[in-house]
């Protein structure tokens, strides 16, 4: 996940480690806090792999030399591969998706739609599992467990609807029509959303 964020930022412009840390915090907000203990080893590994390279630079105004890093052609390819990589596990994918979304502008519209739809489908599957767990729990759970399960259901429903909206926005903006099966699923999702509203 850190590799993706570093490569995405270096795709925008060359930076030294402190700038990367500041940008990671600024652009990715509260998504996660990166420590220098993980940033610099990751930069060194990416450099060994040929994904980034050092450019001797000087920090503005201080005269102090700092190593500035820039992305290479190999790094560009790795960046795109990481952006499109299928999810491995649900919790890691939740965080990884947010970071990917920050850099979606570097992908073609068709790829963005495919990745958004893949995420939407995974969350729709998760939603069905949550609903089944709520139904199975019935009155067996305490009030706080039920409240937490209901919160999970509501949050997942909101995410599914949000993703459906992003997909529709991309399709409209770029004139990309949905395959027939996806149009039916999208219509059904919107009808369910309208009934619960």
Image (cartoon, rainbow, N blue to C red):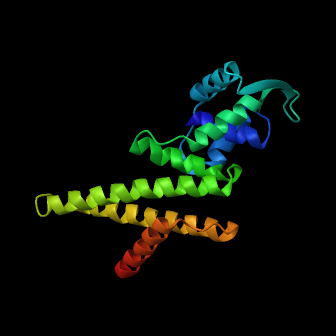
Front-most of residues 25 and 94: 94
Front-most of residues 94 and 112: 112
Front-most of residues 124 and 33: 124
Query: Can you name the residue that lies furthest to the front here?
Result: 180
How far across and how far down the image is residue 150, in percent? 28, 64
120 to 9, vertically: above or below: below
| Residue depicted at 66% across the width and 57% down the height | 109
How far across and how far down the image is residue 102, in percent? 63, 51
In which quadrant of the rendered image does the N terminus lie? top right
66 to 183, vertically: above or below: above
| Residue depicted at 61% across the width and 26% down the height | 42
Give the number of callouts: 0
In which quadrant of the rendered image does the C terminus lie? bottom left
In which quarter of the view is residue 195 placed?
A: bottom left
| Residue depicted at 55% across the width and 40% down the height | 33
Residue 72 appears anywhere in the view: no
Query: Can you name the residue that lies furthest to the left here?
Result: 140
The answer to whether residue 57 is left or right of residue 20 is right
How far across and how far down the image is residue 47, in percent? 70, 22
In which quarter of the view is residue 38 placed?
A: top right
How far across and how far down the image is residue 194, in percent? 40, 80
| Residue depicted at 79% across the width and 24% down the height | 54
Residue 80 appears anywhere in the view: yes
138 to 16, vertically: above or below: below
In which quarter of the view is residue 59 placed?
A: top right
């Amino acid at each position: 996940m850190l590799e993706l964020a570093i490569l995405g930022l270096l795709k925008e412009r060359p930076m030294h480690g402190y700038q990367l840390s500041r940008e990671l915090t600024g652009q990715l907000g509260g998504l996660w806090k990166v420590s220098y203990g993980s940033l610099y080893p990751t930069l060194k590994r990416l450099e060994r792999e040929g994904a980034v390279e050092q450019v001797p630079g000087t920090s503005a105004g201080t005269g102090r030399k700092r190593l500035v890093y820039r992305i290479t052609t190999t790094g560009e390819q790795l960046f795109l591969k990481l952006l499109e990589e299928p999810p491995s596990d649900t919790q890691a994918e939740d965080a990884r998706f947010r970071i990917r979304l920050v850099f979606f502008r570097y992908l073609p519209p068709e790829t963005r739609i495919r990745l958004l739809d893949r995420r939407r489908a995974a969350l729709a599957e998760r939603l069905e599992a949550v609903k089944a767990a709520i139904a199975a729990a019935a009155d067996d759970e305490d009030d706080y467990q039920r409240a937490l399960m209901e919160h999970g259901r509501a949050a997942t429903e909101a995410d599914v609807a949000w993703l459906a909206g992003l997909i529709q926005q991309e399709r409209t903006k770029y004139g990309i029509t949905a395959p027939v099966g996806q149009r039916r699923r999208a219509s059904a999702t919107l009808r369910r959303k309208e009934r619960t509203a």
